[in-house]
Amino acid sequence: MAHPGTHSPGLRVWLLLVVVSRTVESVCGVWPLPQQIHQSPDRYSLSPQLFSFTYGKDSAAQTGCSVLDAAFKRYFSIIFPAFTKGPENGLRYWFESKPFVVSVSVKSKGCDGYPDGDSDESYDLSVSDGQAVLRSMTVWGSLRGLESFSQLVYQDDYGSYFVNKTEIVDFPRFAFRGLLLDTSRHYLPLHAILKTLDAMAYSKLNVFHWHIVDDPSFPYQSRTFPDLSNKGAFHPFTHIYTQSDVMRVIEHARMRGIRVVPEFDSPGHTQSWGKGQPDLLTPCYRGDVPSGSFGPVDPTVDTTYKFMERLLKEVKYVFPDSYVHLGGDEVSFACWQSNPNVRKFMAKMGFGNDFTKLESFYMESIMNMTAALNKTSIVWQDVFDYHERIPQDTVLEIWKGKGYQAELSKMTKAGHRVLLSAPWYINHISYGQDWRMSYAVQPQNFSGTEEQKKLVIGGEVAMWGEYVDATNLSPRLWPRACAAAERLWSDEEKTLNADLAFPRLEAFRCELLRRGIQAEPLFVGHCKHEYNGL
């Protein structure tokens, strides 16, 4: 008989198990919220030594599939970040862990290709005792399912891993879920871009819109025109993206199911271009004499179009995505107005004094070049607003904040596909929980038919770089970009309440910290795994 005040070893273990079972975290769910998710209180313990990923017998993709082989390694480390091959200590043995296998089956192989606008990202995930079965049409759907599974796994206070019985049927609401980085106003080192791609994959964002050049600098190192970066970058050696850098970004993105869409914005936003390409920009005049300053690209000379054609041919071969962003926004007409040669050209073409017609002439030529290269153009809304003759397959992007619903109506009525970024310019910051404003956006809430609403193919978060570099990029982006990520992925009817979303987003923000992403706080509180340094 045990001495009063003591317990037998068996009773002590039983009591401790009761305590442990009551301190296990409840499942917080998945961000962005799946289309359908059903979870049970039934949970299964996981042990890193007994956990594995495998391909289903009926899977078209098998060992050797680059995308999924790499994803299996990546997600093992994400799920079990502290795992070492030495013996495990603590209470986790008391849960009698047994083997757990995540079986992935893909209908079509496609392991060596790139994601595109038609990629099927749907997946079904079933988690039960000893196994999780993930089924998808493509490897890109499998990547989304692996991300969801990784968010279902949680730890108790003693380090033991669990996953609850779960059924998920999921697919994205919009095919285009983008994030824009501006690498001209401040140069972003390669590691900052790659880290952003990682966080995009965690949030199921799937398009990296690389606003790679602009007025301040031209960091893209062109094979065809090396002087563009030699003379137009902040520094010709330290502040450039070499061809190998670009390839690395594209491959890092591909392995995470992310497209890379470059933007070479013209005819405005091109001051840095002129430093390495003589006679490209329009000379500005003061009266009858040149002032020494330059304006937008000169649309009146043949050399401009020969240059643009060669540059776009290079872009076609460097960037495999079918889309290229041609810009076309914020063109100042003052320099064109001052230039006598431009005015002569305007008279010859019958444009009168309407300089929007001159910009239209230029943009139509560039869009036709892009079409001849079998690329789809994206342009900013200005191009549509100037009533230009736009190829029907051109994608229009709305960036102006006021009245974007009316713009959505007009563009879709004209039969164009549209992207929305106006309400998601999150380089603008305000005190408090401004993610709620992003979360409240309803991209299809405008006057139009159901057919018009289908022409909204998605949207993107924009992080312009006037006040952003590698020191503050991540905390300004995350978790604020996650609000748009959920709006673009999830069922709107199930995700309209920001108060209900808050606990899930708070948990996801903590998960981002655990994965090494410097995501800023949403409000007062703490995370079990605080940010551990660079």
Image (cartoon, rainbow, N blue to C red):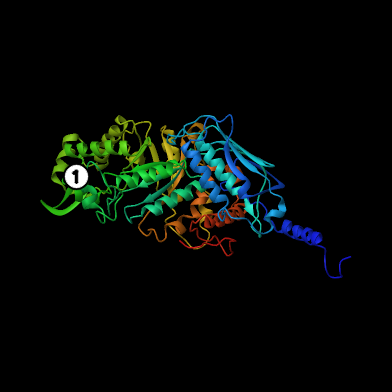
Could you tell me residue 5's position as x and y percent?
Answer: 84, 70
Disc 1, SS: loop
Can residue 517 be seen?
Answer: yes
Q: Is residue 175 above or below residue 23?
A: above
View extreme (front): residue: 86
Q: Nearer the viewer, residue 384 or 502?
A: 502
Q: Dot 1, crowdedness within 10 Å: few (<14), some or many (≥20)?
A: many
Q: Quadrant of the N terminus?
A: bottom right
Which of the 4 quarters of the picture holds residue 22? bottom right
At a point 40% along the width and 47% down the height, the residue shown is: 399
Which of the 4 quarters of the picture holds residue 306? top left
Residue that mark 1 sits on = 280
At a point 56% along the width and 31% down the height, the residue shown is: 59
Can residue 172 be seen?
Answer: no
Dot 1 amino acid type: Leu
292 left or right, relative to 25: left
Could you tell me residue 71's position as x and y percent?
Answer: 51, 43
Total tally of numbered discs in the picture = 1
Could you tell me residue 160's position as x and y percent?
Answer: 65, 55
